[in-house]
């Protein structure tokens, strides 16, 4: 018998249904329609697809999706000016700068130019610092979605040993902070960690966030662990050798249909929360 499937696709649909009701309440009360502005620099095919998916999700719940397409040759100062314009626009509740941007652009400077109150993707240094210190902020969408998924399925976090494999500033590091804030004991590893197999083998909860297809081997994972695979690659696999461990783990996120839908649902939920706050 396989482990419990942590079905992010099903949960995201429930979240969207709830968001649709919340958006309707805002609009019926005369408030501004929750609006997510997405900035895309260039025409990277994967980024174009992600932006389209986010726009479609906004429309499903009655939100507005404002898509800003900038040419590949855009420079840092021009992008900063567009972010400033969106920061000052009261009709915009959330701002998302699609990663990656062209190499000529200072991505960190542009992320940090987003007003923290509109940072619904959790990419600013200030937002991350607040999360790390346990101060209210909008967390990075993927790790925040993972936490929502774990809590929905009543997966224990407090007192558990969580091993996060990956250290990116928008996934691995904020994931570790969020789990630590919920009383997990957290070990952060990466592709250069020595003795990685042994560390993963100690985990009650494994989070694969390293960005390498099936980098985390099934034999590293102990029986009864919870496996969260936050990776997705063109051949349809994640960061964990998932097929070989589903019969031994207590619970797992499928790829696709696990973490991915929760990222978009979280992005929408945090944008709606901004709109509700501005309407109160």
Image (cartoon, rainbow, N blue to C red):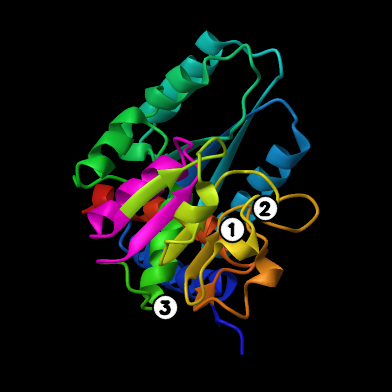
175 w.r.t. 249: above or below? above
Mark pair 1, 2: CA separation: 8 Å
Residues shaded magenta: 159-185
Residue 46 drawn at (x, y percent):
73, 41
Q: Secondary structure at mark 2?
A: loop
Q: Residue at x 66, y 66 (%)?
A: 242
Is label 1 in contact with label 2 (beta carbons under 8 Å)?
yes
83 w.r.t. 60: above or below? above
Q: Earlier in the sequence, mark 1 or mark 2?
A: 2
Residue 198 appears in the rendering: yes
- Judged left or right of residue 115, residue 200 is right
In the image, is residue 189 part of the stretch drawn in magenta? Answer: no
- Judged left or right of residue 209, residue 148 is left
Tag nearer the camera, 1 or 2: 2
Label 2 crowd (10 A; few <14 / some 14-19 / many >=20): many
Q: Which residue is mark 1?
A: 260
Q: Residue at x 58, y 66 (%)?
A: 258
Q: Given the current orientation, which residue lies at the most extreme right position?
A: 235
Placement of the N terminus among the 4 image quadrants: bottom right
Residue 11 drawn at (x, y percent):
50, 74
In the image, is residue 162 part of the stretch drawn in magenta? Answer: yes
The number of discs equals: 3
Q: Which residue is mark 2?
A: 232
């Amino acid at each position: 018998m396989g482990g419990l499937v942590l079905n992010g696709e099903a949960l995201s649909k429930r979240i969207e249904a709830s968001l649709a009701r919340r958006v309707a309440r805002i609009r019926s009360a005369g408030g501004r329609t929750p609006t997510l502005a997405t900035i895309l620099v260039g025409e990277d095919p994967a980024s174009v697809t992600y932006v389209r998916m986010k726009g479609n999700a906004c429309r499903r719940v009655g939100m507005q999706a404002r898509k800003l397409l900038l040419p590949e040759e855009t420079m840092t100062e021009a992008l900063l000016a567009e972010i400033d314009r969106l920061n000052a626009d009261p009709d915009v509740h959330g701002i998302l700068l699609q990663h990656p941007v062209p190499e000529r652009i200072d991505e960190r400077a542009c992320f940090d130019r987003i007003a923290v109150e509109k940072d619904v993707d959790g990419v600013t240094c200030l937002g991350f610092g607040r999360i790390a210190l346990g101060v209210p902020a909008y967390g990075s969408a993927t790790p925040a979605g993972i936490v929502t998924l774990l809590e929905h399925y009543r997966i224990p976090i407090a007192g558990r040993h969580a091993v996060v494999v990956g250290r990116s500033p928008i996934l691995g590091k904020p994931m570790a902070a969020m789990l630590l804030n919920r009383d997990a004991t957290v070990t952060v590893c990466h592709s250069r960690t020595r003795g990685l197999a042994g560390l993963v083998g100690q985990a009650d909860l494994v989070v694969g966030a390293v960005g390498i297809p099936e980098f985390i081997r099934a034999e590293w994972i102990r029986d009864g662990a919870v496996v969260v695979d936050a990776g997705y690659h063109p051949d349809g696999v994640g960061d964990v050798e998932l097929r070989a461990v589903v019969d031994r783990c207590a619970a797992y996120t499928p790829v696709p249909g696990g973490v991915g839908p929760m990222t978009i649902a979280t992005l929408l939920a945090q944008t709606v929360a901004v709109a509700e706050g501005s309407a109160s």
